[in-house]
Image (tube, rainbow, N blue to C red):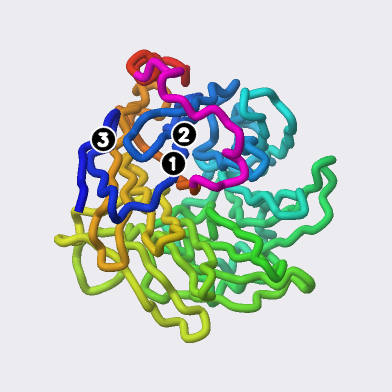
Amino acid sequence: MSIQWGKHGVRLYNLDKACEGYTLIDPFTSRDVWLMDMEGNYVHRWVMPTIPRHHGVLLPNGHLLYATLAPLPEESDMSFPRVAAWAMSGGLVEVDWEGNLVWKYVDKYQTHTFYRMKNGNTMVPRLTRVPDEMASRVKGGIPETEDRGMIWTDGLHEVTPDGEVVWEWSAVDHLNPEVHVLCPLERRGDWTHLNSCEVLSDGNVLVGFRNIDTLCIIEKTTGNIKWQWVGGGISHQHSPTMLDNGNILLFDNGSHRKDDLPISYSRAVELNPATNKIEWEYKADPPQSFYSALISGCQRLHNGNTLICEGLKGRVFEITTDGEVVWEYLSPFYAPLQTIGRRWGRLNALFRAYRYMLDFPGLKGKELDPEKLNWVNCIYGAETSGN
């Protein structure tokens, strides 16, 4: 077994067991997006015109697609959901390898996630207001915490490269306030809080609703919910993805957990939607040593390992099916206080991280040379780039 310590944040690298590739990160409130090799060498850097709203993804054509952080409307704008303002995006930007703008989409109701489809369209989650009659039937939440008397929920728009909306869906038409009950410790203004979506190979859409601890598969042709998992033991989850074996991998954040263990802890979970049974999970020993109340995600790699982003700690690590840590990175990019609010302090958070294999089409022919970047200046210089 060959193990070595890496550079610039990589704390562990098991050469024999880790899945080789390049890892994409975008520090929480910096305009810098980074691609690094297994040893922690930063091989490419995009300096974006605005702060990404949590994360970006590398596309097969080598472009970077990310959610922008748009200025908030005035407090007096009653058409805008203030209760979930920290999760709002306002649009998408696609740039090429050199950072040149190639596509832009603006929607002030767009939230912080998205999915680029194989046909070139983009699935865009967005907030929509719950009608007053239905809002009165929404159960749960902290009493009298509506958003200026309103409750918001989620919808989806499928957008073409020309910006045309060709398919739409709304939770108002398909979720049931009697079944999809808001967590009692969340504000009532944000009923469902969709934080992930994935268009599946059959065209249906896998989504996760954080505030109601629910996963759904939406039938694309009808808009009906084909499958759902409600109250299955997850707590405020992120990042559900469909695996090749038909199971669903997700990050169970564990905040406001309802199980018998009187602590908060996170875990990675593989769920079989045919049986609604958990077939695999990873949690730390002791459980509370692995915990991120917000953000975070996980990705199943080609060799069967799982890449996990423990978001609030800025930690990305790779584990085997037996839970052995074979690669670990701790982000050195700390955000200045003023960019994220005083309740967080200085934070090195990462919304998500993605590993791209060596043969990923978007990397073909690209220069991946760590010598091109002065990493010391980049890291410490990035601290002011989000201002």
The quadrant holding residue 12 is: top left
CA separation in Å, label 1 and label 3: 14 Å
Q: Which residues are magenta?
A: 358-375
Q: Residue at x 44, y 41 (%)?
A: 23
Q: Which residue is mark 1?
A: 23
On the image, the x and y values in percent for residue 7 come to 27, 30
Q: Residue at x 42, y 32 (%)?
A: 27
Look at discs 2 and 3 and give the one toward the viewer.
3
On the image, the x and y values in percent for residue 236 come to 41, 60
Asked whether the residues under the numbered discs 1 and 2 touch, taking CB atoms below 8 Å apart as contact, a structural biologist would say yes
Q: Is residue 328 above or below residue 103?
A: below
Residue type, label 3: Gly
First in sequence: mark 1 or mark 2? 1
First in sequence: mark 1 or mark 3? 3
Q: 183 or 59, which is in the foreground?
A: 59
The quadrant holding residue 263 is: bottom left
Q: 198 or 172, which is in the foreground?
A: 198
Q: Which residue is mark 3?
A: 6
Q: For mark 1, does the 10 Å Cα neighbourhood hold few (<14), some (14 to 19), or many (20 or more) residues?
A: many
Q: Secondary structure at mark 1?
A: strand
On the image, the x and y values in percent for residue 76 come to 63, 31
Q: Which residue is mark 2?
A: 35
On the image, the x and y values in percent for residue 134 come to 65, 66
What kind of secondary structure does the magenta stretch mostly adopt?
loop
CA separation in Å, label 1 and label 2: 6 Å
Q: For mark 2, does the 10 Å Cα neighbourhood hold few (<14), some (14 to 19), or many (20 or more) residues?
A: many
Q: Residue at x 28, y 33 (%)?
A: 9
